[in-house]
Amino acid sequence: MKSIREIFKNNQSLLEEPEVIQLVDYCSELQDEIVELKFQKTENRELPLIDMIKEVVKGCVALEKEQMEHERFGYDAPDYQETIANLKNYIYRRCRDEKIWL
């Protein structure tokens, strides 16, 4: 699933439009309902947890790529690298401890 930043990366000004704001809110509600439906359907918290963890890792990877692009083209960018590395290490360690295979 693409993030809102990925969809609107070429035209950030659209995010200020009232219709787009309404659509983003609606999509967020639907995502919450999907997670809840998966939990009700399987009565297993592992599947929604795996989905959420995958999304976090995917977001971390996207931020790492964005950081590399900023460095490559000489733009000033926040230094997310250490934070992202720590978060990914924590997620992978917890997944290994809980025997959740991504």
Image: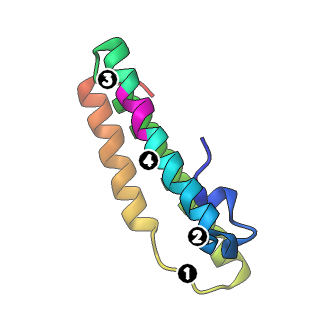
CA separation in Å, label 1 and label 3: 36 Å
Amino acid identity at mark 1: Ala
Camera-nearest label, 3 or 2 = 3
CA separation in Å, label 4 and label 1: 20 Å
Question: Can you tell which quarter of the image residue 16 is in?
Answer: bottom right
Amino acid identity at mark 2: Gln
Is any atom of residue 65 visible in this view? no
- Report how many numbered discs are placed on residues in the image: 4
Is any atom of residue 67 visible in this view? yes
Query: SS for tag 3?
Result: helix
Camera-nearest label, 1 or 3 = 3
**Figure quadrant of the C terminus:** top left
Name above or below for residue 68 compared with residue 45. Answer: below
Q: Compare residues 31 and 46 and report the one nearer the observer.
A: 31
Residue bearing mark 4 = 56
Furthest residue toward top: 42
Closer to the chain start, of discs 1 and 2, is: 2
User: Which residue lies at the image location 27% right of the left edge and 36% below the top edge?
Assistant: 94
Magenta span of residues: 32-36
Closer to the chain start, of discs 4 and 2, is: 4
User: Which residue lies at the image location 31% right of the left edge and 29% below the top edge?
Assistant: 96
Furthest residue toward left: 97
Closer to the chain start, of discs 1 and 3, is: 3
Residue bearing mark 3 = 46
Assess whether mark 2 and mark 1 are in contact (beta carbons under 8 angstroms).
yes
Residue bearing mark 2 = 67
Amino acid identity at mark 3: Glu
Camera-nearest label, 4 or 1 = 4
Task: Provide residue 20's location: percent of width, then percent of height.
Answer: 62, 62
Name above or below for residue 64 compared with residue 14. Answer: above
Name above or below for residue 18 compared with residue 45. Answer: below
